[in-house]
Image (cartoon, grey):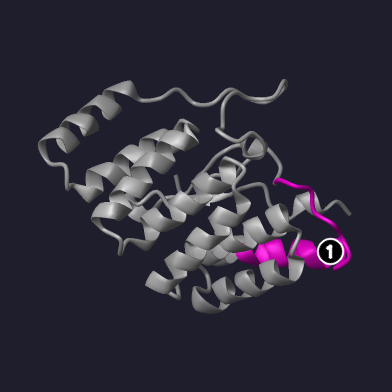
Amino acid sequence: MCFGVILGWVIGVQQAGGRFSAAPAATAAAPGGQGAPAGQPQAPPLDEARVQSLMTVIKNDPKNAGAAVQLGNTYFDAERYPDAIKWYEESLRIDPSNPDASTDLGVSFYYTGQTDRALQQFTQSLKLDPKHTKTLLNQGIVLAFGKQDLAGAQASWKQVVELAPGTPEAQAAQRALEGITAAGHGATPPANPPATAATPGT
């Protein structure tokens, strides 16, 4: 049974409401996140009006960490991950205590082919909040698909199930755990998750 049935997403926390936002993982293989391989869907259009509005806010209030996060979210939603990284990093420079922004930064690193930096960023997120389930969920995904570390992925997902039973994160983690069991512990995952992504909660 193909390991790819386990899950088809990497989740961005997207601070506003903690909503889920997933993006095609095909860009993860291309540092810089530029373009899409043949046969892959095009990236969603960038909301230019929102970018300009947020840039105006930041120009008038350079220490507005929330606006910087929203700008990162806007670029993330358009799969402009290098730009998202820039603004998540800026938000964390202003407010380094935000685990949501830190986790979205880690996801953006993963989508630009920087697996190790993604995992390092998730470690930082968990220092801020050891029970941050979205970080643990994403950490498991990146361990599984970026490092082929199924044992590490299982450990992260089990924590999600234990910490937040019944939540969308726990349900996703449980499906992933069941997928590993169904596929067999010796299965080797592909380098990246499937390109089709589910977006619960949006």
Q: In this view of the protein, which residue sits in the foreground, 92 or 39?
A: 92
Residue 152 spot, x, y in % from top left = 69, 70
- Residue at point 76% right, 59% down? 148
Q: Is residue 84 above or below residue 144?
A: above
Q: Is residue 28 at least partly visible in the picture?
A: yes
> In the shown orientation, is residue 168 left or right of residue 46?
right
Residue 21 spot, x, y in % from top left = 48, 44
> In the shown orientation, is residue 142 left or right of residue 2?
left
> In the shown orientation, is residue 134 left or right of residue 193?
left
Q: Is residue 168 at least partly visible in the picture?
A: no
Q: Quadrant of residue 112?
A: top right
Farthest bottom residue in view? 162
Q: Quadrant of residue 31?
A: top right
Which element type, helix, strand or loop, lies under badge 1? Answer: helix
- Residue at point 84% right, 64% down? 182
In the picture, which quadrant includes the C terminus? top left
Does the segment drawn in magenta span residue 53? no
Residue 158 spot, x, y in % from top left = 63, 75
Q: Quadrant of residue 70?
A: top left
Q: Is residue 24 above or below residue 185?
A: above
Residue 16 spot, x, y in % from top left = 32, 49
The residue singled out by tag 1 in the image is: 182
Q: Amino acid at mark 1?
A: Ala
- Residue at point 77% right, 61% down? 179
- Magenta region: which residues? 173-192
Q: Is residue 83 above or below residue 106?
A: above
Within 10 angstroms of label 1, few (less than 14), some, or many (20 or more) residues? some
Does the segment drawn in magenta span residue 175? yes
- Residue at point 30% right, 61% down? 96
Q: In this view of the protein, which residue sits in the foreground, 95 or 169?
A: 95
